[in-house]
Image (spheres, rainbow, N blue to C red):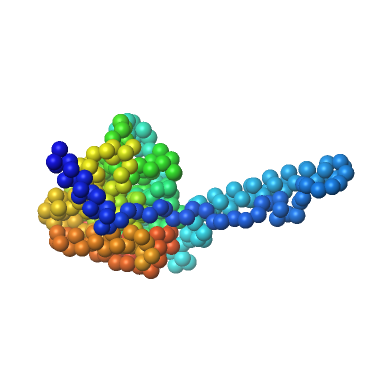
Amino acid sequence: MQAGRSTGRAVRSFRGRWGSRPSGPTLLPQAGGGPAAAAGVHLRGPGRVTRWRVALPVAAVVIAGGILGTYRYLDNFWVYRGFSPPQDPAYVKTRGTTETILVASPALGGRRQQVVVYLPPGYQTSGRRYPVMYLLHGSPGKPWAFIDTVGMGVVVDSLVARGRTKGVILVAPYGSTGPFTDKEWANGVRRNEAWENFLAHDVVRAIDRRYRTVASAAGRTIAGLSEGGYGALNIGFHHPAEFSVIESWSGYAIADTIPSIFGRSAARLVYNSPALYLPKVAPELRARGTYVWLYSGSRDTLRLQNALFARELTRYRIPHTFFVDRGGHTWKIWRSNAERSVLTAVGRMARG
């Protein structure tokens, strides 16, 4: 009982000093005025029945067109977040390819889960093995965001064309049952909800079997944005034998108190809070040479938490880099640091 109280106090103290995570980036723009009003169609007011017979079909067409246009706009915004679709520079002559596979996961009760895989330029003909970056999306989110929104494939294409790297495989699993369903990339208390094991065991093994990878921790980076950044830290700390580089893009270092995922156990929250679990895993991280790379935006409410977490990494002598970039908790900052992220990963991973 005393141990439970002590653990609970540690969680509350940590949260009080370092704060909680913010809500995700704004998904939709603010809109004003409906499509019918914008088209100048007025359905109220005096007039004859014949005018209604003319106005109603016209209004229906305008509204239908407006709804379709609005859907297309919102769908485009959801995919690209207001940015232009990623496009390779003119100097890129050979492009990588992207495919989607399904991984049957014992950790999820046999559920077949979508995994997006990017293969670098020359993969089909080189015969070499490639290091792998595992990319964890945030919430709400989907794995295609790393290709469509962050533009990670274009980043690798460009780096290969400029001779900065021989290439890297990008793997973005779908870490949820829906874009708005929060799983925290953690092993939940409910049956068949082991999302950490899904990534660290099932996805890693499936990728090593299917592709020419550097099949060891030396050839793997785990990275993520926002909630995915937290997931990368948490999974990386729990599985130091699987990943040699851990990247957190605007992530957080303490688990949210979500009973549906973590139950009501203070000990479980500590285990799933990288900043609190660090003292236990630090000796193995040092022995393996695990490298942690993390950043935060200058206007991100998690900036202080990340700075304090970096201080703890220094205290426990974990090799790391932490920096603050101008911006908030947004797609802009993740896009602008994508190339730096890839260069960091490939610079520290083993090459095939």
- Residue 40 placement, left or right of 186: right
Q: Residue at x 23, y 53 (%)?
A: 13
Residue 153 position in % (x across, y down): 40, 56
Q: Residue at x 24, y 44 (%)?
A: 269
- Residue 180 placement, left or right of 125: right
Q: Residue at x 24, y 50 (%)?
A: 12
Q: Quadrant of the N terminus?
A: top left
Residue 35 position in % (x across, y down): 68, 51
Of residues 49 and 85, the one nearer the viewer is 49
Q: Quadrant of residue 168?
A: bottom left
- Residue 224 placement, left or right of 282: right
**From where the camera sits, is residue 297 visible?**
yes
Residue 154 position in % (x across, y down): 42, 59
Of residues 60 and 133, the one nearer the viewer is 60
Q: Quadrant of the C terminus?
A: bottom left
**From where the camera sits, is residue 126 visible?**
no
Residue 164 position in % (x across, y down): 32, 66
Q: Residue at x 56, y 51 (%)?
A: 74
